[in-house]
Image (cartoon, grey):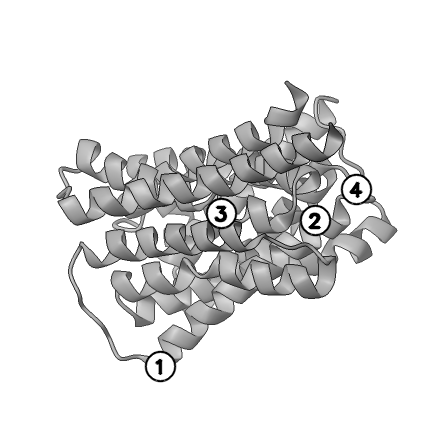
Amino acid sequence: MNRYLPYIAGLTSSVIFGFSFLFTKMAIDFTSPFYFLAYRFSFAFIFLFVLKLSGILKAKVTEKSLIDLGLLAFIQPLMYFSLEITGINLTTSVEAGILISTIPVFVLILSRIFLKEFLSGIQQFFMFLSLAGVILITISRGLHFSKSLVGALFLIACSISAAFYNILSRRASLNYTPADITYHMMLFGFLGFTSVAFFWSLLKRETFEFVRELLIREVMISVLYLGILSSAVTFFLLNFTLSRIPATRASVFPYISTVVALFAGFVFRGERLTLLSMVGATMILLGVWWINAFASKMKREVSE
């Protein structure tokens, strides 16, 4: 059973994150993206802080851990979400979906360099099959491009930062637990995004709005889901997965979020479900399953 836990964790985190798009869309109709990030990571950190105080969460914070995990926590969530939100604002959803889906490709490259982890030829084929599935789902919503080179560069940088997070979390797992890593990530996210949002509200002379918008029902519901489940819990599950299986295999699980988001949009928002998107979803599921099932089979054969 223990050998399946990383896969269960990876799958669960992807399902949770897949629904996050619904809650994000609901919230940003009432508040600014950077205010929302401040709310999200404030709730995420407070949730983990309470668990730590109660003794449920065993996470240590020392001067050494702040130094060791500082770069990882800066890259994810601070750099990743800042680049993502800027890139999305400058491009279309089609471009954003395609460019962000390249994360596993960058993980594949960086894992070879820094971790000496490899995928077999057939696993690489199925990884690109999943990537093609994401692109199919994305373009099934309509081909609209912004021609914004700056926006595209922000999104590529966003994908590279996510890839580096996978590498750094994998390395950090040698000395720190998933709870340690997640706690530092939420701490940095809380301090960084809250500071930026607060000073921005001062500059715009809308500090009252910064506080008031959190109390809007739709924003509060979204913050509770995204802060607790889609940040604190999801990143803990991702860090746990990365501590147990190679980054190249763990990086494809987020593709399942695209499938979940597709069906969540169809069920809860009445969004269109096309044949092209169904084919894309099948390609994603087949690719993710094969990459990890093939690796597990090879591992069992070697052990025998």
**Going 74% across and 30% down the picture, which residue do you hit?**
303
Residue 209 as seen in the image, left or right of residue 78: left
Quadrant holding the C terminus: top right
Q: Nearer the viewer, residue 208 or 284?
A: 284
In this view, 101 is above or below 46: below
How far across and how far down the image is residue 168, in percent? Answer: 69, 55
Q: Nearer the viewer, residue 187 or 156?
A: 156
How far across and how far down the image is residue 201, in percent? Answer: 44, 62
CB-based contact (under 8 Å), mark 4 and mark 2: no
**What residue is shown with label 1?**
149
Query: Rounded to the nearest whole Å, what is the CA distance between mark 4 and mark 3?
Result: 23 Å
- In front: label 1 or label 2: 2
Q: Nearer the viewer, residue 254 or 211?
A: 254
Residue type indicated by callout 1 = Leu
Query: Is tag 2's residue or tag 3's residue first in the polypeptide sequence?
Result: 2
Asked whether residue 268 appears in the rendered view, the answer is yes
**Going 17% across and 55% down the picture, which residue do you hit?**
141
Question: What crowding class fits label 1: few (fewer than 14 Cα within 10 Å), some (14-19), or many (20 or more)?
Answer: few
Question: What crowding class fits label 4: few (fewer than 14 Cα within 10 Å), some (14-19), or many (20 or more)?
Answer: some
